[in-house]
Image: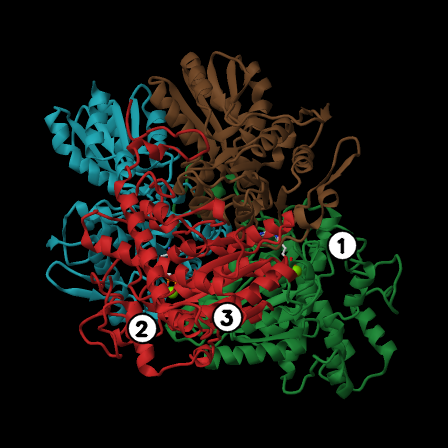
Chain colours: A red, B green, C brown, D cyan
Amino acid sequence: MPEFNETGPEKKGVSRRSFLQFAGVAATATAVVSSARVAMAGNGWTIGLEGVPDERALWMYRTMLRSRWWEEEMKEAFLAGKDGLYGAFHISIGEEACSAGVMAALNEDDYIASNHRGHSHLIAKGGDLSKMSAELFFKDSGYNKGFGGSMHITDVSKGILGMNGIIGPQYLFAAGAAYSAKVRGTKQVAVAFGGDGSVNNGWYYSGLRNAALYKLPMIAVVENNGYQMSMPQQRTNSLINLHQFGAGLDIAHESVNGMDVMAVYAVAKRAVERARNESLPTLIEAKTYRYYDHSGLAGAKPGVMGAFGLPYRSDAEVRAWIAEDPIPKLRRQLVANSILTEEKADEIEAEVRKEVTESIEFARNSAAPDAQAGLQHVFAGSSVSPSQFIV
Amino acid sequence: MPEFNETGPEKKGVSRRSFLQFAGVAATATAVVSSARVAMAGNGWTIGLEGVPDERALWMYRTMLRSRWWEEEMKEAFLAGKDGLYGAFHISIGEEACSAGVMAALNEDDYIASNHRGHSHLIAKGGDLSKMSAELFFKDSGYNKGFGGSMHITDVSKGILGMNGIIGPQYLFAAGAAYSAKVRGTKQVAVAFGGDGSVNNGWYYSGLRNAALYKLPMIAVVENNGYQMSMPQQRTNSLINLHQFGAGLDIAHESVNGMDVMAVYAVAKRAVERARNESLPTLIEAKTYRYYDHSGLAGAKPGVMGAFGLPYRSDAEVRAWIAEDPIPKLRRQLVANSILTEEKADEIEAEVRKEVTESIEFARNSAAPDAQAGLQHVFAGSSVSPSQFIV
Amino acid sequence: MVNKPSNFAMLEALQHGMRNDPHMTMLYEYQRPVAAGPLGNVIDLYKEFGDLRIPDWGPIDEEWHVGGAAGIAMTGVRAIARVPSMCVTRCFELVFNQVGKLRHMTGGQVNMPLVIWQDAAGRNPGMAGQHADAGQEALYASIPGIKVVVPSNPYDAKGLLAAALQENDPVIIFHYPAIDGNPTDVPDDNYVVPIGEAAIRQEGTDLTIVGYGPAAVEIKRALPGLEEAGISAEVIDPRTVKPMPIDPIIESVRKTNRLLVVDHGHETLGTAAEIIARVAIAVPGAKFARSTFPDAPPPGAREMIAWMTPDAPKIVEAAKHMVA
Amino acid sequence: MVNKPSNFAMLEALQHGMRNDPHMTMLYEYQRPVAAGPLGNVIDLYKEFGDLRIPDWGPIDEEWHVGGAAGIAMTGVRAIARVPSMCVTRCFELVFNQVGKLRHMTGGQVNMPLVIWQDAAGRNPGMAGQHADAGQEALYASIPGIKVVVPSNPYDAKGLLAAALQENDPVIIFHYPAIDGNPTDVPDDNYVVPIGEAAIRQEGTDLTIVGYGPAAVEIKRALPGLEEAGISAEVIDPRTVKPMPIDPIIESVRKTNRLLVVDHGHETLGTAAEIIARVAIAVPGAKFARSTFPDAPPPGAREMIAWMTPDAPKIVEAAKHMVA
Ligand SMILES: Cc1ncc(C[n+]2csc(CCOP(=O)(O)OP(=O)(O)O)c2C)c(N)n1
Ligand SMILES: Cc1ncc(C[n+]2csc(CCOP(=O)(O)OP(=O)(O)O)c2C)c(N)n1
Ligand SMILES: [Mg+2]
Ligand SMILES: [Mg+2]
């Protein structure tokens, strides 16, 4: 169960045990809010629950929680070391609202193309936690049978065209998937998720440009978490608001508070309608933050949420963003609006934690792939030769 | 001496012998214009000679003529067949104002990076006609010693980083050259020339984006001649005005009438000042037209300027653009402003024609390269092996 | 059955494919899929299948054509990307790190019914630099997950493309216009030339000559000269470069003990290297040679590029040298 | 002279170069040119040469790093582009159709004092797909106009980079982190390891083993096992892949009559193919084998990738097999 950095809470409540409890209390401590005020609160971007079916709002809550707990528990397993986990691990904790908000606006058969920081995208799109856990354990029962690991999880059957270890291709793939939907006349929508760093790339231009040209039902969601590895976004882009790029392509474009799932949902809904009804693309910039380091676990501690002491950002900055955490924010809203009781919320949390724990157990108990398996799947139904051996 | 298509002049004067005489008369026939009215004439973009030193205006006139005559004579040589000319040949006739107008704003040591349709860029930047002719004849005395032909002419000593057979890299090269100028503190400027088709390419984005990011003294001149091969520009771009792309990068951007050399010069001058003094990039879109086919000589006839009867454009369109020809337009302006007399203008024309004819004679009389020469220049100072032979 | 230009023959295969699969989509740049057959009949895929499945307004953006087509293919819709000849590697990273890897790195999940129709230039005088290249099929063959075929005549061009359209793996077909110098009858009906099958063009005992694509055209042209020189050459056209059908070549060299590989690609790490390496490992004691374009870009002047290109006379000389 | 990590050793070469040439500029992405030496001394090129010559804010755009650096180089300013390991071919078209061709297609006019420092991944478990590749130096070696070097230890890494910085032709240096498994003393002063010169690491008579980069590290690890097996191996590290220093290898195989090439690249058209082809042409009758990574992308799971990678035990087995 993660806690905040003990070394010096700079905001009220950061030493509370659960981040959920913390943030709830922090909010309560600030003011006893009415449901109307909750709906209006925030930094101006925030919108409320009006017009959002309860079920969908609850789905967003559970979805963000599933992603959060799965990554937290996976982080704990990495840190604990006893499973000998290895490989890439890009944590999306802090950014869950972007995934849940967008996916809440999508249909099951819509497509997403994700990037290296895509666990939360996948979970929101219906990814199976057990198969994801097993993939991080490089087990045969994993989504990719141990071939891919964290960075390449894919579930074509759920419209998940995959995470990817290379920055940029998702914009082409999503535009292509949108093109395919148009050819088939299905009204499906395709969403590309990328970081602020992915906009530096010619494929970003190409994907969006061709979506504009061919009027494709494609949405690009740029999750601007302020950093490309250790490089602040402002240093690698002359634009302050990345969505401005859309102006040069004459497509719809806007920024949204990526720490507010309802705000993201509202923007995504408009974009999805534009895509589905008018077959037009949209560029969305979601301003968000990753609580952990770029990859791996520098500065991370067991039971503490967030990575502190990193050279390229201040702990105060990390704490300030954690104070905006979208999960307790939504819980607060749901409780204030009587969509959820505290007890029901705790129950959901318990269910999610159980599901996560079981998924990790499943992974732990699964078998490793055969060494020889790597010769398969180069082409369908055949194997390549084991050229490392002389026979 | 080229003449217009005999098959059906749609504008007054098109059957006159010389395109210069023609257009002059066409203008005269429209109205006897005062120098002030000439300066203001045109489609709103046009500006006059105010503030332009006579010498520079005359240089532009001679420069456009040199390019025009050189390409016309080369076309005649291709069509005549007796020299057995072969290889790529992209004619820039009609677009000379873009080159002359931009180059009039540059210093000798500034850089340009050109494309496949670059003869006029090179001539305006000081390219030697004899070496260019010899290169089109694939002779050893050519700029590229017969290695390159029309599409690759280069003169690094004059800041000409070369024409190029691939669409797009000029934007990276010019941005790199601008970067180099910044490192050396020379205040040089680098200009990339590309067609409307070149904006489809990720390198366009990358070159401009990095020029914006690093504040480079770089200018991109998009010569929008309305076609990419046979494809109308409107079909391959969702933007109507290509310069709008600059809005998405937050850089200076504007369109200009590419058939008016003074208008081009005025825009280029501002861009060059911005680059040289503020180290900032500019995107310029010059609306222009190529009178001939994309490459080769389909529809072209000896002694007739322009290619007619092509399936993807109407002859009327071609004629309408020829009526806007920038060379007679400038001659008219210069004469009306007493910067040039008709006699002096004819004299310049004769000089240019002589220079062009001599350059072709030079090419004709030069030696072909040795067959074995192609093994050289892969690396500096060594040869590769003739692996086509078994020894 | 009549002679048909390879482009027309390939459009026949595409037409057949697109008629049978209502979603099959082709992205391309400017090589409009229209061609006239030998009897004046015209195939116009654009007209037949329309702006959505054959968008007639391809931007100059090969990464879109390949990357977008890969996205289409990932949704289960067969896609064809036609890439122009002067920029054979513009989308290499997408093919290397995405198209070729996606099935494997997802543990077999991703099907990639993608065909890249790669127009290839060939060693033409006057084009120079970027417009007279050949041999880049070796670059694609050297990376995992891509099947690579190179027809040497119109019959194979149609049949190999038809085969590619049935694959669930990405296939790149290199189409060199020079193969029309090797005219063949082409049936009107659809048929398949299986991927991975070599063609033994002539049996012989003195030496084995291997070449595909434009090199195969030159080898065919060399046959009279070889006969005249009294050389009994076994001629093999692998047709597929990856997976390489090496067995018939090995078998042949076991018999002739001499292998000459002709290739219009470069010397270093062109396909000839792989063929020789495989045979050298399998048949120790044989004699090997390759005649390839030198390790240089293609120069423009006719004198230079003609001298540098392996052609029929050079092949005859090489064979004489080997059997001497 | 002390052991130094290869990254530090290479920064020493760069530091020397940048101190001696006031304009030399490096474009890179995120591999900040800062490293600590064995004695705690730190090289921080960014601090020393500043934001203009070492811009510490590289966008994720490898085409800019290489294409922009090429533009810089064309103006006569020496440029270094450092490219991250997972996208070794992101700028392949620029290198193939521009950087490698510009001198030739301009008839010798364009100098290209450009060094591409290509960080390479190597066969690491857990990275999978795009982050555990090796052997892409073969792709660059197969195209004209690029010199390709691959050091197998920190000494060579520094010396080859120093040599590259003196070239007027483009050089790509593949830096595999695994070469730090082959520690060497590295002088503090600048020195050059000439491009195109192989190193004979051990003399022997039974067979010739050739490998560079990470394969050379494994070959070194195999030496005790080979000795134990009573095999006298001649070990050659070509260090340069293009132009390939083939003569010492040919000479060696003339002596041993057996050639084993070890390569962490793929089987098909990896560098091993070229080495075997050249030697097979020159030394008929010799026996050839290659031990390479299979023609598959790198899988993530340790079990798979370790089994697929040619390592010391497999090299010993292969050698035994060959001399048996
Ligand atoms: C083409 C390419 N270049 C470089 C990398 C190395 N890399 C992996 S993640 C990353 C930073 C990405 O930043 P951003 O897009 O902002 O996403 P974030 O990690 O912040 O979610 C880089 C440079 C890569 N994977 N692909
Ligand atoms: C990367 C690349 N793709 C395709 C081509 C083939 N090609 C040569 S010129 C051209 C059209 C260029 O159009 P535009 O940029 O408008 O220039 P214009 O010819 O009109 O001057 C094309 C598609 C090429 N040379 N390079
Ligand atoms: Mg980021
Ligand atoms: Mg154009």
| Amino acid at pointer 1 | Tyr
- SS at circle 1: loop
The answer to whether B294 appears left or right of B367 in the picture is right
Residue D303 seen anywhere in this rendered image of the structure: yes
Label 3 and label 2 in one chain: yes
Disc 1 crowd, CA 10 A, few/some/many (<14, 14-19, 20+): few
Amino acid identity at mark 3: His
Q: Is residue D26 above or below residue C313?
A: below
Please tell me which residue lies in front, C138 or C293: C138
Mark 2: which secondary structure? helix
Q: Identify whether A249 is placed above or below A123.
A: below
In which chain is the residue bearing label 1?
B
Tell me whether circle 3 and circle 2 mark residues in contact (CB < 8 Å). no
Q: Amino acid at mark 2?
A: Ala
Q: Quickly name the residue at label 1.
A: B312
Read off the chain for label 3.
Answer: A
Disc number placed over residue B387 in the picture, else none: none
Specify the quarter for ligand 2.
bottom right
| Residue at image mark 3 | A243
